[in-house]
Image: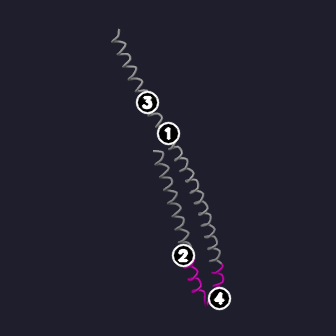
Amino acid sequence: LHEKLQATQSEVHALTLSVNQFEHVRSELEERLEATTMELANAKDALVRTQERLHIANQRSERVLSDCKLQLQNMAEHCMASQASWKAKVEDRLYEVRARLKHVDARRRELTAMLSQTVRYSHKLRS
């Protein structure tokens, strides 16, 4: 009976150690889950902000393009009226418009890259 009691006590002790280890691992996993959840929330917030910036940049790009088209139309009408300087004026304005469009396009690509990076980071955090 004494041997059975000792064996049972040893088994209870081993089970207690296992439960304690399980509780420790569970606690660590809960902390990691909480930290990952916070990181994911932060990444989501960053994604939303990036999307908002991209939307604003796209709206600006559309306004710039619209303004450029209007300016080009006005200039073309003026140049038709004064044919002597028409070719030089159009070429100068086209150069300026292309430079502006390149700048706008570069900014759009930059914001799109930031959005893609944020999405990749978000996916990385989920996995």
Q: How has the structure been colored for display?
A: one colour
Quadrant, the N terminus: top left
On the image, which quarter does residue 91 sit in? Answer: bottom right
Question: What is the x, y in percent for residue 93?
Answer: 58, 80
Residue placed under numbered mark 3 in the picture? 22
Separation of residues labelled 2 and 4 (CA atoms): 25 Å
Q: Are marks 2 and 4 in contact (CB under 8 Å)?
A: no
Separation of residues labelled 3 and 1 (CA atoms): 14 Å
Three-letter code, disc 3: Phe
Residue placed under numbered mark 1 in the picture? 31
Label located before the other in sequence (1 or 2): 1
Range shown magenta: 74-96
Q: Nearer the viewer, mark 1 or mark 4?
A: 1
Three-letter code, disc 1: Glu
Separation of residues labelled 3 and 4 (CA atoms): 87 Å
User: Looking at the magenta stretch, what is its main secondary structure?
Assistant: helix
Q: Residue at x 52, y 41 (%)?
A: 34
Query: What crowding class fits label 2: few (fewer than 14 Cα within 10 Å), some (14-19), or many (20 or more)?
Result: few
Q: Are marks 3 and 4 in contact (CB under 8 Å)?
A: no
Three-letter code, disc 2: Ala
Question: What is the x, y in percent for residue 13?
Answer: 39, 22
On the image, which quarter does residue 72 sit in? Answer: bottom right
Q: Residue at x 62, y 89 (%)?
A: 83
Q: Nearer the viewer, mark 2 or mark 3?
A: 3
Query: Vertically, is 108 above or below 28?
Result: below
Q: Nearer the viewer, mark 1 or mark 2?
A: 1
Residue placed under numbered mark 4 in the picture? 82
Identify the disc placed on residue 99.
2
Label located before the other in sequence (3 or 4): 3
